[in-house]
Amino acid sequence: MLQTIRKFVIDNYLFGEEGKLGNEDSFMETGIIDSTGILELVRFLESTYGIKVEDEELIPDNLDSVSKIVSFIQAKQSALTREDDNILFQPLEKLPT
Amino acid sequence: MNMQPAVSSDLLRIDPEAETERITGWIRETVFYQLRRKGVVIGVSGGIDSSVVAFLCVRALGSDRIQILFTPEADSSPDSLRLGRMVASVLKTESAVENISAILEEAGCYQRRDASIRSVVPEYGPGYKCKIVLPGLLDARRYAIFSIVVQSPEGETKKVRLTPEAYLGIVAATNFKQRVRKMMEYYYADLRQYAVAGTPNLLEYDQGFFVKNGDGAADFKPIAHLYKSQVYQLAAYLGIPADIQRRPPTTDTYTLEQSQEEFYFTLPYEQMDLCLYGKNHGLSAVDLAHTSGMTEDLVERAYQMIESKRKVAKYLHADSLIIE
């Protein structure tokens, strides 16, 4: 996941220059990604990892570096898994019809 | 002893009489002797900035050397033409109306914009209205991500986050408006050997709130050094009609009423002015917050936003580059 996200950022915002991006580098401080770039990044994350990024999740704590994105996606995916498990292990009468 | 100046709107106070003298002298020198043009074309939108520029140009060159131009299109508010005409009438200048709807129609401005909107709001169609909005800076520490607000003919509104393609498609299509307006202004400039006046204030100029080769293009920009609140001070001094002074700043680009704050600056202009002043004068967020009534967190975020918009504006300000 980390390599996929790095590759997306490097290909799209650093014109392929691999050495210019540390995994902890803040996109805002380094000016790598502007607001249109965030739109592109969010669309990439949603389509690649099958998640939905809510408006209130559009914050630097979740998206401002490669590492933060990885943690955010992992948290989203594990939340999704828990939701699925809850549905699977519910008593039969509570299963969605 | 703390020598930090008090930070309040007093800091932005100017001597309007002296500033008017300075600007009008500069306009005369620039238009006649640097640009060697016989007068000035000004696109007047009925907003405060273009009205102030028109008043200044008339003071500088005389009303017989000014061509005012109105360029309404299908989405323009009728107020724009009404207030613009008021300016021309008070100043007794030559004026012309060039309705640019047909050019925009032929260029596919409306059709391309609507197709982009439909990619995120499939039901969008005739009778609908729209605008693009950003979350306010006060709204929590969120990225400035654009959404579209649409209103159905029945009055129902809906807000949807834009995809990158939809956002770029809408902006690229609506930018035809500013570029066609500038094309018209240069038609009159060529016809009369006039210069074209640009009307951005400092907030717009510094932060890149203009369309490259659209409203960003001009031969001279006589108020680009003034904060928005300073433009209002000049407006009061110059006697600009009260209706124009009272009109809230608007983009007049989308069919739903849209403030500059929700489209671009994310803060009311008074606060943006103070934050830009603080940033330009090296004031810490703590000092600016302490004396301006804003929170330190808000000032810090405004400083960050100013910096990031400046990065985007660098491309907008860049001339065509050549190999030296």
Image (cartoon, coloured by chain):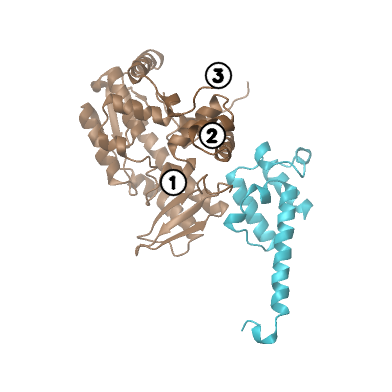
Chain colours: A cyan, B brown
Q: Is residue B214 visible?
A: no
Point out which mark residue B289 bears: 2
Q: Residue at x 40, y 52 (%)?
A: B110
Check disc 2 and give the amino acid type.
Answer: Ala
Check disc 1 and give the amino acid type.
Answer: Thr
Crowding at mark 3 (Cα within 10 Å: few <14, some 14-19, many 20+): few
Q: Which residue is mark 3?
A: B3
The mark closer to the camera, 1 or 2, is 2
In this picture, residue B33 sits left or right of residue A93: left
Which secondary structure lies at badge 3? loop
Check disc 3 and give the amino acid type.
Answer: Met
Point out the residue furthest to the bottom here: A93
Q: Residue at x 54, y 24 (%)?
A: B281
In this picture, residue A66 sits left or right of residue B200: right
Residues at marks 2 and 3, common chain? yes
- Percent across and percent down for residue A39 are 59, 51
Label 1 or label 2, whichever comes before in sequence order:
1
Label 2 or label 3, whichever comes before in sequence order:
3
Q: Dividing the image into 4 quarters, which one contains the N terminus of chain B? A: top right
Q: Nearer the viewer, residue B181 or B260?
A: B260
Q: Which residue is mark 1?
A: B174
Q: Residue at x 65, y 59 (%)?
A: A46
- Percent across and percent down for residue B312 are 57, 36
Which secondary structure lies at badge 2? helix
Q: Chain of mark 1?
A: B
Q: Nearer the viewer, residue B52 or A18?
A: B52
The mark closer to the camera, 1 or 3, is 3
Q: Chain of mark 3?
A: B
Question: Pointers 1 and 3 in contact (CB under 8 A)?
Answer: no
Q: Dividing the image into 4 quarters, which one contains the C terminus of chain B? A: top right
In this picture, residue A13 sits left or right of residue B278: right
